[in-house]
Amino acid sequence: MYVKTQLRELRSVYEAFIGDRVADTTWRTIKRFIVDSGLELNANNLHEYALLRKRYPKLSLTPLEFRALLAAVDQARNSLPQLITGGEFINLLISQEIRPDISTIYRWFKQSGSKYNKTSSYSTEVMFAVIYRAVVWKFIDRRKSKKNV
């Protein structure tokens, strides 16, 4: 189990990323969620959870869905080359069965602090933020299609 000082440090890391104090009950819920998802309670997993909560505050996930989403994000990130053009990125999305409307892609790039252009090259930093949104979009889209069946 974790020592109290380790838990306080992890809580501080989470609160620093969120930018606000977290209530004791909320902290217990977050700890339980991470542990129930089968992940280690560490700064990296807390950061990923906080990032997801910040970007998608209304997205409800089970611990297993969270773990699957993290695995999909990691797989997508690992498939990115150092530099990639907009056109190559579209092909990468298609190869991962992510097929959003072009306006959605423009929005992802804008939210990541860039502008989409088919011929422009993008760094991994920009692409990590965009691919994150793409994977979450695919997850939400699949969930919707399962409910409609």
Image: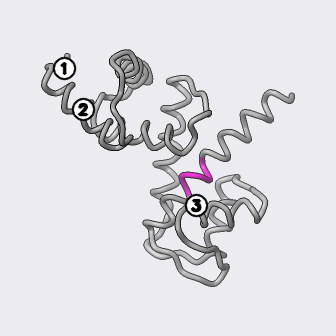
Mark 2 or mark 1, earlier in chain? 1
Residue 111 marker: 3
- Of residue 30 and residue 147, the one placed in the foreground of this image is 30
Residue 140 marker: none
- Quarter of the view holding residue 6: top left
Label 2: which residue?
10
State yes or no: discs 2 and 1 in contact (Cβ < 8 Å): yes
Q: CA distance from mark 2 to mark 3?
A: 28 Å
Report whether 124 appears left or right of 22: right
Q: Residue furthest bottom?
A: 119
Residue 98 in the magenta stretch? The answer is no
- Of residue 2 and residue 113, the one placed in the foreground of this image is 113
Quadrant of the image containing the C terminus: top right
Residue 2 marker: 1
Q: Amino acid at mark 2?
A: Leu
Q: Residue at x 20, y 16 (%)?
A: 1
Q: Residue at x 86, y 30 (%)?
A: 148
Q: As displayed, is residue 92 above or below residue 135?
A: below
